[in-house]
C-alpha cells in the first residue's frame, strides 16, 4: 500500500483556483512560475473542448462550459452556468465555436466551427499511470509526446490521460505535495487524470505536521484546483451518494479532438478506502466501478461521443505483451479484467489502467486495455482509426492498434540518472528544455535533503519483498520498536512492533546511508501509532494475516511467533525473546504506523478494540524517527541488516501464505 497524507481547508482550494497557474498560493505563500517554464502561448495545443479552471486551457480561446443533466432545459444565458453544488452524471464541455446538445448557439465573435473530419482520422491515445512523482523523467516524456504530435500533424490528434497515483513517491514531488507534477502535466497537455489511492496521501494542505483536524483532503483539493485538465472519478462519492463538491473533480468529460468527440471516464479502485489512512478518506465511498463506468459511458455515447476512453486506477497483469489477442499470460482475477469483461460490446474503446504496477497491452472483451508499469518506466499507446459513414456524419472505429508499453529509456539498467532515448516516431528524442526549466526548482529543493548523511554504514543491502519476509521489513520493524519505546510515555514502553510489506518501496543499498535512499525505501509520511490489545487479540490478528492470500506481509519485532493448525484452526502462540510465553489475557502495546493502527489494510479488523485503545504520536514522521535510530546504531559501527541463514522466522508461516488448516 500506501501509507498516507495531509489536506487543505476549502478556502485554500478556492484561493488556488482563482490564481493563474504558475502564480498560485501554496502553504500561505505565493509561488511564482518556475523560471524558464513555458508560457501559456508556448504550450502544445489542447484538445478541443474542456479544459481548464475558468473556461480556459493553456491560453486557448475562451470556451463555453455546459453542465448537462438528463432532462435539463435550454438556457438563453450566454455566460457559463454557475457551478452546481453537485456535478451531474455527465460533464459535457463544448468546443470553442461548437455547441453541445441543448446549448446556446455561440455568439458571433466565437471562432467558426471546425470543418467536418476527413474520411478517416487517427486518434492516438497515450496513457501514463503510477508516475509516483517521477519528476526527472518528465523532460524525456515531453520529447516522446512532441514527436508523436509532429507525426500526427493535421491528420489526427493525441489524447493524453493518466490513470492515477501521480504525486507520492519522490522527494522532488513530495516536498511540494505534488505541485510540480501538476505544473508539468499542464504543460504536457493532459486531457484528464484519474484519482489514485496515493492522491490522498498528503492529507491536509501544508507541512507534514499540519493539524489532522483540518480538511483531510486539502492537499489533493489544492492540486485539483491548479490542474488545467479535469480529474475524473465516476465511482467516488460522499456517504450521501453524491460526487464530492471539489473544484475540478468530475465523473466524466466530453472533449473534441481532431473533429472527433471523445468521452472520458475516470475510475478509482474500490480498495482505496482500505489502503489509505482512514482519516484521509473519512466520509468518502468508492463504489462498484463497472456500474459507474457503464452509466457514464452510456451518457457519453448519447451525447455524441464516437470514442469512449476510460482512465482508471485499477489494472491488470500480463507477462507476454507481443500479441494483444493472447490472454493466456494475463491474470483473470485482476480488477480491470473483471470490470471490462462485463461491459456491453462497443460501449468502451480504450481502458488505460494503473495501480498494479504491472503491464498489459491486450484486447479484452473488445476493449483495448493498457497499463505500463510505474514511475514513468514506460507509457501506453493505442492508435484508433475512425471513418466517417458515407451517408451521415457519424464516425466509427474502423481499426485499432495496441502497442506494447513504450520504455522511455534505452539504458538497460532503467536507472533514472542514465535514462535517455535515441529516436521515436521517426525523429530524434531531445529532452524538453522548457520542461527541464520547469522542474529545476523541485530538483534543487530535494537535492540537499537527498544527500544528507544518516550517520550509519550498511555492510550489506537491506532488500525488500512484498509477500514474503525480508531483511528490509525486519529492519523497519526493529526501528519501529526502538522508536516506539523511545516515544512511549508511561512505566512500560512498546512490547511488539509490526511493519507493513506494502510500505517497502526500494532496497537500502550497502555503504554509507543517505536520506534520499531512506526516503525511496519509505516515501510515505506516516507517524507512530500505538494499539493496546491482549495477547489473545494479537494472536488472532496475526492468524488472520497469515490466512490471507493478498497484501504485503507483516514483519514483526519484539516477540516470536509459532503458527500451528489445531483442530482445523490456525493458532499463533507468542513468546518473548527470553522464551517466556505471552498469556492470552496479558495486555500488550503494539507500535506500528498510524496507517495500520487506524485500520489500514484491515489489519485490526478481526478484533474489537475500546475507543481509547489507539493512540497516535504527534511530532516527527516515522521515516525521520528511523533516521535517528539508524544514526544511534551507526555510532556502534557498521550495521548488517541481511537475513541470517538458518535463523528462526520471526513470523512463522509468513513465507507460505495463505496458511490453511483444511
Image: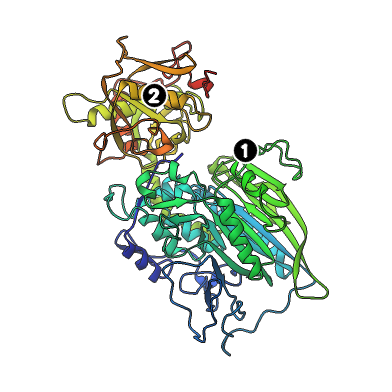
Q: Dot 2 corresponds to which residue?
A: 540
On-image quarter of the C terminus: top right
Q: Dot 1 corresponds to which residue?
A: 333
The local crowd at label 2, few if under 14, some if 14 to 19, many if 20 or more residues have their Cα within 10 Å, is some
Lower position in the chain sequence, tag 1 or tag 2: 1
Q: Quadrant of residue 489?
A: top left
Q: Position of residue 71 (x, y in %)?
A: 55, 74
Q: Quadrant of residue 395?
A: bottom right
**What colouring method underlies this structural image?**
rainbow
Looking at this rendering, what residue extends furthest in the left direction?
A: 491
- Name the secondary structure under disc 2: helix
At horizontal 28% and vertical 32% (from top left) the residue drawn is 530
Q: Is residue 184 above or below residue 446?
A: below
In the picture provided, is 203 more to the left or to the right than 380? left
- Nearer-the-camera pick, 316 or 84: 84
- Nearer-the-camera pick, 231 or 240: 240
At horizontal 56% and vertical 84% (from top left) the residue drawn is 104
Q: Position of residue 51 (x, y in %)?
A: 53, 69
In the picture provided, is 530 more to the left or to the right than 466? left
The local crowd at label 1, few if under 14, some if 14 to 19, many if 20 or more residues have their Cα within 10 Å, is few
Q: Is residue 555 above or below residue 442?
A: above
Q: Position of residue 111 (x, y in %)?
A: 61, 84
Amino acid at each position: 500500500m500506501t501509507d498516507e497524507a495531509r489536506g487543505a481547508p476549502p478556502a485554500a482550494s478556492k484561493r488556488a483556483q482563482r490564481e493563474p497557474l504558475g502564480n498560485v498560493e501554496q502553504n500561505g505563500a505565493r509561488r511564482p512560475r518556475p523560471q524558464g517554464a513555458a508560457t501559456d502561448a508556448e504550450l502544445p495545443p489542447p484538445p478541443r473542448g474542456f479544459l481548464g479552471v475558468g473556461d480556459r486551457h493553456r491560453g486557448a480561446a475562451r470556451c463555453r462550459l455546459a453542465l448537462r443533466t438528463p432532462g435539463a432545459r435550454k438556457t438563453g444565458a450566454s455566460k457559463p452556468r454557475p457551478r452546481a453544488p453537485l456535478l451531474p452524471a455527465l460533464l459535457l464541455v463544448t468546443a470553442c465555436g461548437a455547441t453541445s446538445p441543448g446549448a446556446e448557439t455561440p455568439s458571433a465573435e466565437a471562432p467558426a466551427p471546425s470543418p467536418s473530419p476527413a474520411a478517416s482520422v487517427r486518434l492516438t491515445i497515450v496513457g501514463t499511470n503510477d508516475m509516483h512523482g517521477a519528476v526527472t523523467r518528465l523532460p524525456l516524456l515531453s520529447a516522446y509526446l512532441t514527436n508523436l504530435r509532429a507525426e500526427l500533424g493535421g491528420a489526427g490528434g493525441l489524447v493524453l490521460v493518466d490513470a492515477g497515483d501521480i504525486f507520492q513517491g519522490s522527494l522532488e514531488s513530495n516536498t511540494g505535495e505534488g505541485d510540480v507534477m501538476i505544473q508539468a502535466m499542464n504543460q504536457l497537455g493532459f486531457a484528464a487524470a484519474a484519482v489514485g489511492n496515493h492522491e490522498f496521501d498528503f492529507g491536509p494542505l501544508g507541512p507534514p505536521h499540519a493539524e489532522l483536524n483540518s480538511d483531510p483532503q486539502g492537499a489533493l483539493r489544492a492540486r485539483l484546483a491548479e490542474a488545467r485538465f479535469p480529474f475524473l472519478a465516476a465511482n467516488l462519492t460522499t456517504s450521501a451518494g453524491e460526487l464530492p463538491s471539489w473544484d475540478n473533480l468530475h465523473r466524466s468529460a466530453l472533449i473534441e479532438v481532431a473533429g472527433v468527440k471523445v468521452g472520458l471516464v475516470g475510475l478509482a479502485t474500490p480498495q482505496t478506502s482500505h489502503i489509505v489512512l482512514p482519516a484521509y478518506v473519512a466520509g468518502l465511498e468508492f463504489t462498484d466501478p463497472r456500474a459507474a463506468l457503464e452509466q457514464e459511458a452510456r451518457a457519453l455515447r448519447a451525447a455524441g461521443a464516437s470514442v469512449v476512453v476510460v482512465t482508471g486506477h485499477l489494472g491488470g497483469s500480463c507477462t507476454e505483451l507481443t500479441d494483444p489477442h493472447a490472454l493466456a499470460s494475463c491474470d483473470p482475477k485482476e480488477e480491470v479484467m473483471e470490470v471490462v469483461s462485463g461491459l456491453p460490446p462497443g460501449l468502451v474503446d480504450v481502458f488505460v489502467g494503473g495501480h498494479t504496477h504491472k503491464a498489459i497491452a491486450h484486447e479484452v472483451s473488445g476493449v483495448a486495455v493498457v497499463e505500463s508499469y510505474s514511475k514513468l518506466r514506460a507509457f501506453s499507446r493505442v492508435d484508433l482509426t475512425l471513418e466517417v459513414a458515407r451517408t451521415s456524419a457519424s464516425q466509427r472505429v474502423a481499426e485499432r492498434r495496441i502497442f506494447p508499453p513504450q520504455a522511455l529509456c534505452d539504458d538497460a539498467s532503467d536507472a533514472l540518472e542514465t535514462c535517455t532515448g535515441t529516436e521515436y516516431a521517426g525523429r530524434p528524442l531531445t529532452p524538453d528544455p522548457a520542461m527541464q526549466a520547469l522542474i529545476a526548482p523541485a530538483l534543487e529543493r530535494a537535492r540537499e535533503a537527498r544527500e544528507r548523511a544518516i550517520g550509519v554504514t550498511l555492510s550489506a543491502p537491506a532488500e525488500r519483498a512484498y509477500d514474503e519476509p525480508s531483511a528490509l521489513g525486519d529492519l523497519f520493524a526493529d526501528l519501529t520498536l526502538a522508536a516506539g519505546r523511545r516515544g512511549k510515555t508511561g512505566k512500560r514502553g512498546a512490547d511488539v512492533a509490526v511493519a507493513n510489506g506494502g510500505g517497502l518501496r526500494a532496497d537500502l543499498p550497502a555503504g554509507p546511508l543517505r536520506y534520499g535512499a531512506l526516503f525511496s525505501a519509505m516515501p510515505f509520511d506516516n507517524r507512530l501509532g500505538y494499539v493496546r490489545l491482549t495477547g489473545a487479540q494479537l494472536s488472532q490478528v496475526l492468524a488472520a494475516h497469515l490466512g490471507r492470500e493478498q497484501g504485503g506481509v507483516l514483519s514483526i519485532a519484539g516477540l516470536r511467533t509459532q503458527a500451528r493448525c489445531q483442530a482445523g484452526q490456525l493458532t499463533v502462540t507468542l513468546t518473548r525473546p527470553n522464551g517466556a510465553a505471552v498469556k492470552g489475557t496479558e495486555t500488550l502495546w503494539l507500535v506500528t504506523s498510524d496507517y495500520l493502527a487506524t485500520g489500514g489494510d484491515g489489519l485490526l479488523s478481526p478484533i474489537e478494540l475500546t475507543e481509547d485503545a489507539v493512540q497516535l504520536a504527534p511530532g516527527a514522521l516515522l521515516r525521520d524517527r528511523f533516521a535517528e535510530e539508524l544514526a544511534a546504531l551507526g555510532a556502534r559501527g557498521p550495521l548488517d541488516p541481511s537475513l541470517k541463514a538458518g535463523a528462526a522466522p520471526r513470523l512463522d508461516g509468513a513465507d507460505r501464505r495463505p496458511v490453511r488448516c483444511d
